[in-house]
Image (cartoon, rainbow, N blue to C red):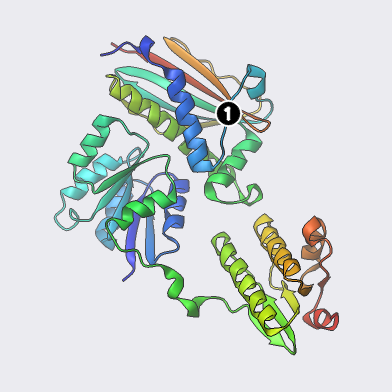
Amino acid sequence: MGDIQQLDLKSIAVNSTKQVFQTMLSMPIDVAASASESTISGSRVVGSVGFAGDVMGSIYIHVPGSFAKEMAAAMLGMEPDEIEDDDEVNDVIGEVSNMIGGDLKSRLCDAGFPCQLSIPNITRGTDFQIDTIGWVRHERIGFKKDNQGIVVDVYVKSVA
Amino acid sequence: MTLKVLAVDDSKTIRKIVAKAFAPYDCQVIEAENGVEGLAIAGKEKPDLIILDITMPVMTGIEMLAKLKAQPNLKDIPVIMLTAESGKENVINILKMGVKDYIVKPFKGEQLIDRVSRLFTLKPLQSQESEKPKCVSQQGDIIIFTLPERMERHQGPEFDTMFQQTLKGMVDAGQNKIVLDLHKVKEVNMFIVRLIIGIVQHGQKARIKMQAVGTGALASELKGFQETSELVVHETLDAALAAF
């Protein structure tokens, strides 16, 4: 087994997030130059997946509520005003989380940390924070798409 | 013969993307939300091809694949796995289980079609001329181009092309008057508006005189866009014809 401290979690998360947005949504995104560029205020949708095995971890993808709708429209080839309910948005954010989490899970397996991926979860709200405890590694990466902020949090700890 | 494709994925979005990718071809796409449902449908429908996700609730794609391969009447159906997990071990495991191919998410519909084309000859639907909606009619020297009540988003390019072909025919025949008949269009959304904007711009480029017919709601909507703000929308076809 390798050392999870040696894993370049940030690069993995940056590359897979950019690739998912580019390929599935045709939305190129950039890493934010500063935390303020990716700040999300107001309504927020958070997609998350967990992985468990020789390592445990979670990935959270935070996006503004209005932008989540734009993402759903882009992935479904529709206009935002054609997205009728939250289920479609949830499904898209869940699938985006699954793809980003799946890529990280694959990199962990290849690095000698076999683990399984959970199905995605969605959290919505306007004023909340997600606290996690006991993680050995935490990476927070801010992205921006025009004036919209996107935040990806990666938490990992080894079990053995 | 229509290719019968079973798409098994817990994400409705991915099932829609798969169905959309096959839409231009002579294919029937059947959907299932998980492995249990997928197995049941596979037994009943005997699809020609299964597109199978891995991470799903109730029964994963790996479990479904194992059960599929254990059934003599289903084991030879080609399976393409669609997976967010590209780890070497994962890929080796699924290939060992006898899948024909695998696609790592994120993916584009074109990639899926490319992989399927290696297994099957996909027949385009374009030969079905008789099923195309009839949009063009003529009164005197005025052409009438009518949009139907309902249009699916994927039909947009088809109507746009049809309009351009109509314009070309008009120019060749020395005609320069057209009525854009939108009276059947009940639902106004951005897709419809964009289609109409495109049509109006084609007409302007070809220097064709255009009048339109439509509801008051549609007329108000079109007034709000620069490209269609000068399009005169009449309440009746007779009024539009008389306006030339």
The amino acid pointed to by label 1 is: Asp
Horizontal side of residue B4 vs A141, given as left or right: left
Looking at the image, which residue is at 28% across and 54% down? B40
Looking at the image, which residue is at 73% across and 69% down? B203
Within 10 Å of disc 1 (Cα), the crowding (few <14, some 14-19, many 20+) is some
Who is closer to the viewer here, B137 or A98? B137
- Position above or below: B26 against A3: below
- Answer whether residue B32 is visible to the viewer in this image: no
Horizontal side of residue A99 vs A113, given as left or right: right
Q: Quadrant of residue B152?
A: bottom right
Who is closer to the viewer here, B198 or B135? B198
Q: Quadrant of residue B1?
A: bottom left
Q: How many marks?
A: 1
Percent of width and height locating residue B130: 49, 80
Percent of width and height locating residue A104: 39, 26
Looking at the image, which residue is at 66% across and 33% down? A146
- Position above or below: B85 against A26: above
Percent of width and height locating residue A121: 47, 32
Report which residue position mark 1 lands on.
A30
* Mark 1 chain: A
Who is closer to the viewer here, B34 or B195? B195
Kindly state the secondary structure of the residue where label 1 is placed: strand
Q: Quadrant of residue B178?
A: bottom right
- Position above or below: A99 against A72: above
Horizontal side of residue B189 vs B101, given as left or right: right
Looking at the image, which residue is at 34% across and 34% down? B85
Percent of width and height locating residue B241: 80, 82
